């Protein structure tokens, strides 16, 4: 399991415990990639995870990619550290991933809370056939990105999904009902976060257009 963190010190222990429980009986490792959190997240990650990596102003996309590449197992689950992705779904996601022989499985929320995410669903989502473009609750084949370096800056994981589609990798989707969002999300308040997601969506649309 790979997660990227920024100021998630209060969530890390419960996240690790829940992931360990969901993967009980399966060989696994937990990789936490921290983007220089000022609240001591990295120290907690070093204490609790199998592997903790410290980045500086890397952003979520690059942090996830580095975590995936550093994993020792051929199948990698990624999820957010804020406890909004239910770890108990991981075994079912792994089962679907294996049975359908996928390269990438996205756990798509049945309700998209932000207008910017709904816009991405109606644009990028229709192109690539995945409803929840910015869900980072995913299962990857680790070697999908062995030679890839992100080129778009921060896209909140969207570039990894777009690249997989461009390359013709086999994508799948598994819907789930999300829990309520936390009051203060990692990437800012409602106005700021919608603006940042819309900017990421614009970059992804250009990226997809020029890849055709």
Image (cartoon, grey):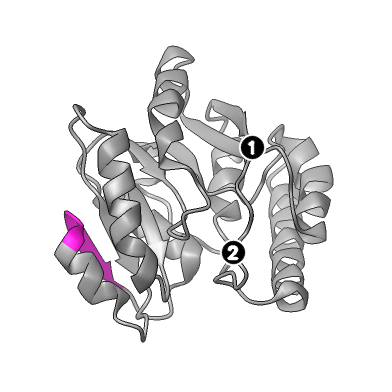
Front-most of 203 and 42? 42
> In the image as oriented, which residue stretches furthest toward the bottom?
38
Identify the image quadrant of the C terminus: top right
- Taking depth in this image into account, of 70 and 24 the one nearest to the observer is 24
Q: Position of residue 93 (x, y in %)?
A: 45, 28
> Which of the 4 image quarters holds residue 48?
bottom left
Residue furthest top in the image: 99
Q: Which residue is mark 1?
A: 177
Label whose residue precedes the other's in the sequence (1 or 2): 1
User: Residue sitting at 75 percent across and 41 percent down?
Assistant: 125
Residue 206 spot, x, y in % from top left:
75, 57
* Marker disc for residue 108: none
Residues shaded magenta: 48-54
Q: Quadrant of residue 8?
A: bottom left
> At 17% across and 32% down in the image, what residue appears?
27
3D distance between C-alphas at marks 1 and 2: 15 Å
- Classify mark 2: helix, strand or loop: loop
In the image, 123: left or right of 106?
right
Q: Helix or strand or loop: what does disc 1 sit on?
A: loop
Q: Is residue 54 left or right of residue 211?
A: left
Q: Residues within 10 Å of mark 2 (few under 14, many from 20)?
A: few
Membership of 125 in magenta stretch: no
- Depicted 9 relative to depicted 83: above or below: below
- Against 126, is 52 above or below? below
The N terminus: image quadrant: top left
**Residue in view at x 52 percent, y 49 percent:** 136
Where is 108 relative to 210, above or below? above
Neighbourhood count class around disc 1 (C-alpha, 10 Å): few under 14, some 14–19, many 20 upward: few
Q: Are marks 1 and 2 in contact (CB under 8 Å)?
A: no
In front of the other: 204 or 147: 204
Q: Which residue is mark 2?
A: 182
């Amino acid at each position: 399991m790979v997660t990227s963190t920024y100021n998630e010190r209060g969530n890390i222990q419960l996240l690790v415990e829940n992931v360990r429980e969901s993967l009980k009986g399966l060989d696994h490792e937990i990789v936490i990639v921290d983007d220089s959190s000022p609240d001591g997240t990295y120290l907690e990650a070093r204490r609790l995870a199998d592997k903790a990596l410290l980045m500086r102003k890397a952003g979520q996309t690059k942090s996830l990619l580095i975590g995936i590449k550093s994993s020792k197992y051929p199948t990698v689950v990624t999820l957010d550290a804020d406890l909004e992705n239910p770890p108990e779904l991981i075994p079912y996601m792994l089962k679907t991933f294996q049975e359908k022989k996928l390269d990438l499985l996205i756990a798509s929320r049945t309700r998209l809370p932000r207008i910017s995410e709904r816009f991405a669903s109606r644009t990028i989502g229709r192109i690539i056939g995945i409803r929840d473009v910015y869900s980072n609750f995913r299962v990857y084949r680790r070697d999908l990105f062995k030679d890839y370096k992100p080129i778009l800056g921060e896209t909140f994981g969207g570039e990894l999904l777009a690249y997989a589609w461009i390359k013709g990798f086999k994508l799948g989707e598994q819907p789930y009902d999300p829990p309520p969002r936390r009051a203060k999300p990692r990437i800012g308040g409602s106005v700021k976060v919608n603006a940042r997601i819309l900017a990421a969506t614009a970059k992804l649309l250009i990226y997809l257009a020029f890849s055709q």
